[in-house]
Amino acid sequence: MHVQQILFSQGFGTRHECTGMVVNGQVSLAGRVLDDPFEDLDTDGLVLHVNGEAWPYAEKAVVLLHKPAGFECSMKPKHHPSVLSLLPGPLRVRGIQPVGRLDEDTTGLLLLTDDGALIHKWTHPKRKLPKVYDVTLKHPMDEAARQKLLAGVVLDDDPEPVVASAAELLTPTLLRLTITSGRYHQVKRMVAAVSNRCEGLHRSGFGQLSVPPDLKPGGWVWVDPSAV
């Protein structure tokens, strides 16, 4: 694929703008500055450096964001900045969007992609991907309440009980809860159903992924879709 085409496909601007980036010496490969916008490159395992920043070629982008509080998982936010503002311009140009949503006050693991098929696959109820939340509780939780979460609690919009796949008390006021469904405010409502209150919510796992320990809030990393 031509260098210009690669840059265009990755969201670096119009074809004309991508041509200009190459001509202006803004793109390099393995230490060699590329000067021909129409040079053919093999995209398999390709990592370009654009303005000094490494950029691996990805036909479809998948990234993991460590979401901080105070950001909305929306393309058109109403009260807080969008999580998209935390990502570089090329990813936003490509139309990357969140896989599911986290409330603006919820922190932790958020996947984003421009692959609609993956979004459908990962959010479809039949897939039952586990999502792990660390819940800071207002009141200490006893064993009876923990067992209720595992047995199933009824939410006000559905008579069918919602069951936690796992519920581990890390401390009396810190609960690690695993669910496989994704209803509106589900974790908060499950905690309320056992007469407690969620004071803080952090998603630490999604599928097989977890937040890298060295990834600070607001930071992001590329993800191999097969790792989910």
Image (spheres, helix red, strand yellow):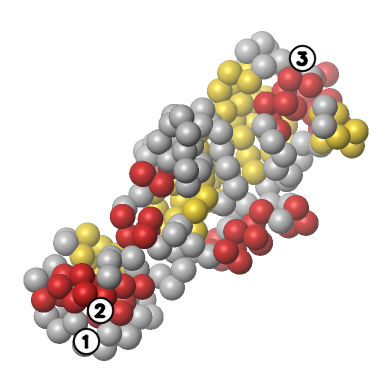
Q: Is tag 3's residue or tag 1's residue first in the polypeptide sequence?
A: 1
The quarter holding residue 66 reads top left
Image quarter hosting the N terminus: bottom left
Res. 6 visible in picture = yes
Q: Which residue is mark 2?
A: 4
The quarter holding residue 24 reads bottom left
- Is disc 2 in contact with disc 1, using a CB cutoff of under 8 Å? yes
Q: Is tag 2's residue or tag 1's residue first in the polypeptide sequence?
A: 2
* Residue type at the position of mark 3: Ser
Rendered residue at 74%/20% (across/down): 192
Q: Of helix, strand and loop, which one carries label 2?
A: helix
Q: Of helix, strand and loop, which one carries label 1?
A: loop
Rendered residue at 79%/21% (across/down): 193
Rendered residue at 57%/64% (across/down): 116
Crowd rating for badge 1 (residues with CA inside 10 Å; few <14, some 14–19, many 20+): some
Q: Is 174 above or below relative to 187?
A: above
Q: Which residue is mark 3?
A: 195
Distance, label 2 to label 1, CA atoms, is 6 Å
Rendered residue at 16%/61% (across/down): 52
Distance, label 2 to label 3, CA atoms, is 59 Å
| Residue 173 x %, y % | 63, 17
Q: Which residue in the rendered view is the most extreme toward the top?
A: 139
Image quarter hosting the C terminus: bottom right
Crowd rating for badge 3 (residues with CA inside 10 Å; few <14, some 14–19, many 20+): few
Q: Nearer the viewer, mark 2 or mark 3?
A: 2
* Residue type at the position of mark 2: Gln
Q: Which residue is mark 1?
A: 38
Q: Is 1 above or below relative to 150?
A: below
Distance, label 3 to label 1, CA atoms, is 64 Å
Q: Of helix, strand and loop, which one carries label 3?
A: loop
* Residue type at the position of mark 1: Phe
